Structure formats: C-alpha cells, structure tokens
Amino acid sequence: MRGGTERSHHGETSEALYLTSGYVYDTAAQGNARTADEEAGYVYGRFGNPTVTMFEDRLALIEGADACQATATGMAAVFASLMSQLRAGDHVVASRVMFGACYVVIDQLLPRYGIETDLVDGTDLDAWERALRPETRCIFMESPGNPTMPVIDIAAVSALAHGVGARVVVDNVLGMPTVQRPLALGADVVVYSTTKHVDGQGRCLGGAILGGDAFFADDLVPFIRTTGPVMSPFNAWVMLKGLETLELRTARMCETAERLAAFLEGHPAVDAVHYPGLASHPQHALAARQMSRGGSVIAFDLAGGWDAAFRFLDALELIDISNNLGDAKSLATHPASTTHQKIGADARALLGIGDGLVRFSVGLEAEADLRADLERALAAAEG
Ligand SMILES: *Cc1c(COP(=O)(O)O)cnc(C)c1O
C-alpha cells in the first residue's frame, strides 16, 4: 500500500505523477557525475522516472525481489528478460503451453538470432531433464500456463536448471503476485504483463521484470537503457494505484472463480474444466503447494466443439467477448480462433487447445449474475 512512495515537498497523499522526459542539472559537473553513475539522480526518461521508480519499488517489495524494471507491455518484459541475457549459440528450454505471443518469440524469433530453442511438456520433469544441456542459458515457463492451465513444479524445474547453470524465467501472469511467488520457489526472474491484474481495470498496457541485482546490473539494465522499451510515467501511475487494491481484487476474483469452476464442472454442456483449484486438475496437489488460491482464470471444453463455443460466446449478455484477462469485468475468449490462432492447428493440437475450449477470466461482478449468464450461454451452446 505504501511501499516505494516518495512524497515530494508538497506533502501529497497520493503519489505524484511526474510527466517529464528529461531532468535539469545544477551544474555541468553534476551532469557529468550523473552520467558516469558517480552521483545518484535521474538523467533521462529512458533511464528512469520518479513515478515509474515508485511503481517498481512497490512491486519489488510485494514480490520479494532485489529489483524491478517496468516495461511498456508484458511482451516487452518477456522479450527483454530473455534477449538481454542470450547470445548466438545459447540454448533455451521452455514449457510448451504459454501465451500465444510468448510462443512466437521462443519458437520463431529467438532462432533467427542463432539461439536454439526446445519446447517441452512442462509438467514432465523427465522431459526437462532430457532437454537441458551445458549450453542451456535460460528456462522459460508460464505456470499456470495459458490457456489450458497446466501447473509446473517451479522448485523442481529450477533445481534441474541450476544444475546446468541456466537461469529460470517465470511468466507469472496467471499466478499473480498475490497467489504465487516464483522467486521464493527458486526461480531467478519473474515477468508480468501488468496490463492484466495489476492495472486490473482495462486501462493501460504495461509489464515488469523482477530479479536479482547481478542480473539487473550485468544484463537487463544496460539492455533496457539502450533499446528503450520502458513504461510511461502515466501508465506507471495507473499501475501504482492498481497495486493498492491488487490483493482485495484478486482475492475476490479467486473466490468467485473457485465457485464458478465447481459449477461449470457439474454442467452437462461442459466436457472438462481446467482450473488448478479443482481436485480434478491433474496437478492439483502441486498447485495447492505452490499457489495460495486457484487463480482468476478458468478454461473449459464445450462438448459441442467450435460451433458450441461460438454459440456460447454469442449468447453471453454480461460477460464480454475479449482477449484480455485479469480485468474487473469478466471476459471470455475462444483461444483457437483468437489468442492461439497464429500458432496453427498442429501446434494447438500439441498444446491441447481444442476447438471447444473457452478461456474465462473472472472479474468482480456478483457471482449470482455471472452464474446466470453462464447458465444462459451454456444452454445456447447445447443448441
Ligand atoms: C497478456 C500476456 C502477456 C503479454 O502481455 P501484454 O501486456 O499484452 O504485452 C504475456 N504473458 C501472459 C501469460 C499474458 O497473459
């Protein structure tokens, strides 16, 4: 709530929004000292901003990280967290089930720069062990994975990765800072799309990278300063206010999601529900160990396939059809035709993304209203 706040001489209660791209030096010598990192202080907006620093410091405190770098989007965070520490000849292993754009970065972009990548079933420890090599520099995983919700043993995979000297990067968007703490489980770097639960009200894009001082000093900060994917002060101010209510919002979302997942599981139009908080989830015991709640996102397979999924979405009156997640407004999407369209049918089959799969991001509406909307849409799905 208060961590990171740096109150100005005006004594404002809410954090100040410093909309400035540059900073003024008192003397030429001071400009020289700041540029040489001999004197603390801001030099240019690409290097830092007081509002952005307040957001970074607050999120670092929540996450238990040495340092935080805010970025323009979640994808800027994912790309910079990897590209800042990789070079040609390095090898990356990633868990296959992930956000569509992360999949494209790892499967298609990194190989263009001479970085070899392997995708594995993240829930299979033997598969990780077989894929790791002496030249493996990074492990990337999303847990729970978007959109089919597999849960990966972060502690066990981190131990394997550290055995070959690789750094572990966890995309913790679905875990959320309030539910899962990858650094405490052994991961080295955590990335967020703060567009999701941190803003949580559908206003701004943003991202964050959290990790240790050595990674920041040697790799990340020089990369960010020269390539420039930083968060704007305005967006940082919105995110900072989002952090004040993050715990309340995500607790309520999880509570509603836990109840609606159980309701969906009992419905005849639904073949399967993928939610870490349900006893039927294949990694439920692991999820109970490394997550404090089940999360705010539920995926489920409709028995009637693609057509049933479209009938379901079109019949919703309260829940919006949208690709976003983590918003105060409940949102539903059809991954096969939207978020995971670009990876193609073969990759979708490998990831278990069926034609009838719906991803449902639970918001802050009354549970009874959401349940009534789901009931109506499920009846339409049944035709
Ligand atoms: C949304 C999302 C991203 C990308 O974030 P943007 O802010 O849209 O760039 C990355 N990973 C996961 C798991 C996401 O849900």
Image (tube, helix red, strand yellow):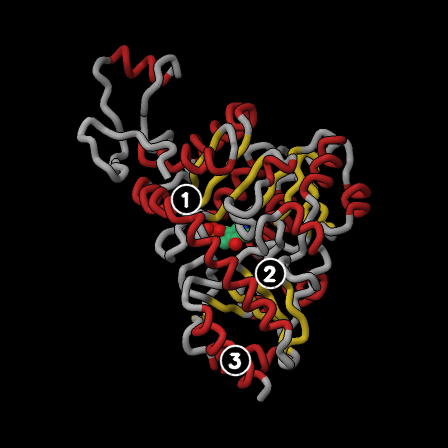
Report which residue position mark 3 lands on.
375
Residue 234: give its label: none
> Regarding mark 3 in the picture, which secondary structure is present there?
helix
Q: Do the residues bearing badges 3 and 2 touch, measured as CB atoms within 8 Å?
A: no
- Figure quadrant of the C terminus: bottom right
Cβ at disc 3 under 8 Å from ligand 1 = no
Coordinates of residue 256 in the picture (x, y in percent)? 50, 63
Tell me the distance, in whole angstroms, between the alpha carbons under discs 3 and 2: 22 Å
Residue 147: give its label: 2
Is residue 134 in view?
yes
Q: Nearer the viewer, residue 231 or 111?
A: 231
Residue at far left of view: 10
Residue type, numbered disc 3: Glu
Vertical relation: 204 (above or below) 228? below
Coordinates of residue 269 in the picture (x, y in percent)? 62, 80
Decide which of tag 1 and tag 3 comes sooner along the chain: 1
Residue type, numbered disc 1: Ala
Q: Do the residues bearing badges 1 and 3 touch, measured as CB atoms within 8 Å?
A: no
> Regarding mark 1 in the picture, which secondary structure is present there?
loop
Q: Do the residues bearing badges 2 and 1 touch, measured as CB atoms within 8 Å?
A: no
Report which residue position mark 1 lands on.
72
Which residue lies at the image location 24% right of the left edge and 37% below the top edge? 13
